[in-house]
Amino acid sequence: MPTALTIAGSDSGAGAGIQADIKTFAAHGVYGTSAVTALTAQNTLGVSDIHVAPDDIVSAQIEAVVADIGCDAVKTGMLANSSIVEAVAAAVESFDLPNLVVDPVMVAKSGDRLLDEEAVHALRWTLVRLARVVTPNIPEAEILAKMTVRTRDDMREAARRIATLKPAAVVIKGGHLPGSEIVDLLLDNGEFTEFRGPRVEGSNTHGTGCTFAAAIAAQLARGVTLAEAVRLAKEYVAGAMRPGIPLGGGHRPLDHFWRGIL
């Protein structure tokens, strides 16, 4: 069975973070493992508290998983601070971990800041360069590319700038741009590919970024090409948003098992 490791923060009740990743891996027939970077007190309305794990514990979790179970893909999410970012990058290099999908989680859906400037700097210069693909949304792309993104041409320029940080590929998610159609943009080997789909209306949006990146990681663990992994991940997230789960009073969780298990 293919395996995937998520390195991210926990989510106590909103359907994002490690909880979303593990569900996504399971829905794709991939055995999921995890290394917890932070405990969050969180629900669909927002984040009320965060307890960050020591970086040596994060490293120990990764080593414990890799030494015994191994992994065919790795997905990172909330990394909390620069020490954890650097520890994760060191582990990726030390263990030669494959198919690294970096979801540069910086701001929660509620608007709560999850990564400080020092950690963003570390992410930009230590972890992104190791990625098979980095998957920012528009606000995250603006931070990584150091520019404003308002159009699809801006998305292309931002992808080019992020590519100078030396990830193997970049996917910029277009959901923050207005319009009835969402266009996600992949830059891989110097070529752009657009993935288009209708905007799914409703409040079932919590964990979409985590789920998208985890779905890409799961598909890469199964041996799918990157372009196909992105296409399938976009299709999966849209499907999970449509039924959703009617829980909570804020950004509600996705239905990760909307089509059963592959």
Image: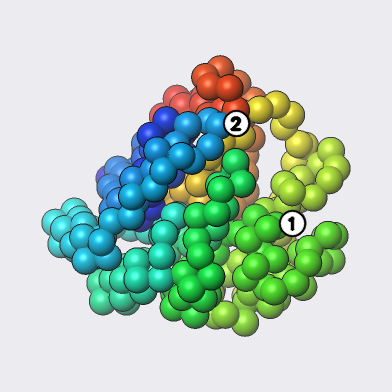
- C-alpha distance separating marks 2 and 1: 27 Å
Q: Is residue 74 visible?
A: yes
Q: Please, what is the three-letter code of the amino acid marked with disc 2?
A: His
Please indicate whether residue 63 sits to the left or right of residue 122 in the image: left
The local secondary structure at tag 1 comes to strand
Q: Who's the residue at 72% across and 32% down the image?
A: 200
Question: With respect to residue 191, does 5 lie above or below?
Answer: above
Classify the position of the N terminus by image quarter.
Answer: top left
The circle drawn on residue 251 is 2
Question: With respect to residue 164, does 194 lie above or below?
Answer: above
Find residue 178 and report its image quarter: top right
Please indicate whether residue 96 sits to the left or right of residue 261 in the image: left
Q: Please, what is the three-letter code of the amino acid marked with disc 1?
A: Glu
Please indicate whether residue 200 sits to the left or right of residue 252 in the image: right
Question: With respect to residue 19, does 93 lie above or below?
Answer: below
Q: Which residue is mark 1?
A: 194
